[in-house]
Image: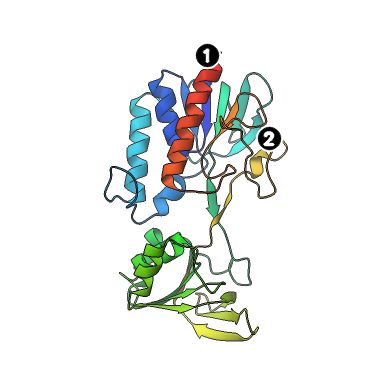
């Protein structure tokens, strides 16, 4: 495989794939390097119903179409790689993967996305994949006719709780506040679902079981009282953190670990742009990631032409 490119895009979520589409269509020699599966968090979404022009599609299908578009325009792609070294300061940027292959480019777009935020309580690591999940699409059908808990109060939590009732006999939403942060239609739909109950102003303080998750301890945040509940599974949807650890010491990050960008989505380093859920912004949707990827790509093209 060739090693010298016009642009390297780090990340193959909606932002990175969109950047790849625009760059390759503009005849920029483009490589996308991705540390995980193509599609990022999008592939974890059971149904995307608010993407303009598409009435309903699974996140996996949408990501697959984006990937095909980028590659049809000539974009090269490497997935499931490990970034082992970065040089983003030099005029010619270089990125080493798997501690053995190095690729260079005149410009870089950072689109690493994020990962599911964890509760960070006792038992969580032990029961990951053994009753604790962060992906309804991946694991929902393992809980056919079982009782589960969904943790969270945003759009993802309520929408995925509703989708999980296709499998589970009962879903209990546990949320730390007395109100939800989700859109009203998502709240209304969850409240009207007879399979969904709510435990508000509470949080899970620990997980336990013998081999598999069997119980959770739920703490009432008003009284401090802790009650134990038998449960078959827990799905955690409390947001996610940006995958930016690899950029510490290379570019400016804010206190949340998000990449700081200007109006052109350029980072603190000349010729290094960023897009998607890892940048500093208020809203994180597939549509905003796609918009970021477009803007970053167009400004990268302008940078290379100047």
| Horizontal relation, residue 71 to residue 205: left or right | left
**How many numbered circles are shown?**
2
Marks 1/2: CA distance? 23 Å
Q: Measuring 70% from the left and 34% from the top, which residue is drawn there?
A: 250
Residue 305 — which label?
1
Quadrant (top left/top right/bottom left/bottom right) for the C terminus: top right
What numbered label is drawn on residue 221?
Answer: none
Residue 180 or 74: which is nearer the viewer? 180
Closer to the chain start, of discs 1 and 2, is 2
Q: Is residue 5 visible?
A: no
What coloring was used for the rendering?
A: rainbow
Q: Which residue is identified by label 2?
A: 251
Q: Is residue 214 above or below residue 185?
A: below
Secondary element type, mark 1: helix
- Tags 1 and 2 in contact by the CB under 8 Å rule? no
Picture coordinates of residue 200 (x, y %)?
A: 52, 77
Q: Residues within 10 Å of mark 1 (few under 14, many from 20)?
A: few
Describe the element under mark 2 as helix, strand or loop: loop
**Which residue occupies 51% across, 38% down?**
11
Residue 135 left/right relative to 83? left
Q: Nearer the viewer, residue 286 or 29?
A: 286
For this orientation, the residue located farthest to the top is: 306
Within 10 angstroms of label 2, few (less than 14), some, or many (20 or more) residues?
some
Task: From the top left corner, tell me how far across and down residue 196 is, in percent.
Answer: 38, 76
**Residue 109: x and y, percent?**
55, 31
Q: In this rendering, does residue 248 appear at all?
A: yes
Depth check, mark 1 against mark 2: the one in front is 1
Q: Please, is residue 248 above or below residue 3 in the view? A: below
Percent x, y for residue 4?
Answer: 53, 19
Task: Give 259 or 5, whichever is nearer the viewer.
Answer: 259
Residue at x-position 48% and y-position 27%: 297
């Amino acid at each position: 495989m060739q090693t010298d490119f016009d642009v390297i895009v780090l990340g193959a979520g909606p932002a990175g794939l969109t950047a790849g589409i625009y760059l390759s269509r503009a005849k920029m020699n483009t490589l996308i390097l991705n540390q995980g599966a193509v599609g990022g968090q999008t592939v974890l979404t059971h149904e995307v119903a608010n993407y303009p022009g598409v009435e309903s599609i699974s996140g996996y299908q949408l990501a697959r179409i984006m990937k095909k578009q980028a590659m049809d325009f000539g974009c090269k792609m490497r997935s499931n790689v490990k970034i082992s070294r970065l040089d983003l300061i030099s005029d010619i940027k270089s990125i080493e993967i798997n501690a053995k292959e190095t690729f260079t480019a005149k410009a870089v777009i950072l689109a690493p996305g994020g990962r599911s935020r964890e509760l960070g309580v006792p038992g969580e690591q032990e029961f990951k994949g053994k009753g604790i999940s962060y992906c309804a699409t991946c694991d929902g059908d393992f809980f056919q006719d079982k009782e589960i808990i969904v943790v969270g109060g945003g759009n993802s939590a309520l929408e995925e709780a509703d989708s999980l009732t296709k499998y589970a006999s009962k879903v209990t939403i546990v949320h730390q506040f007395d109100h939800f942060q989700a859109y009203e239609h998502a709240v209304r739909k969850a409240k009207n679902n007879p399979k969904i109950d709510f435990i508000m102003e509470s949080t899970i303080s620990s997980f336990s079981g013998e081999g598999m998750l069997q119980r959770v301890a739920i703490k009432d945040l008003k009284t401090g009282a802790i009650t134990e509940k038998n449960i078959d599974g827990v799905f955690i949807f409390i947001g996610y953190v940006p995958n930016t650890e690899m950029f510490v010491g290379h570019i400016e990050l804010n206190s949340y670990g998000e990449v700081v960008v200007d109006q052109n989505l350029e980072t603190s380093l000349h010729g290094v742009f960023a897009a998607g859920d890892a940048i500093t912004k208020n809203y994180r949707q597939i549509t905003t990631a796609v918009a970021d990827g477009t803007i970053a790509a167009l400004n990268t093209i302008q940078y290379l032409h100047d």
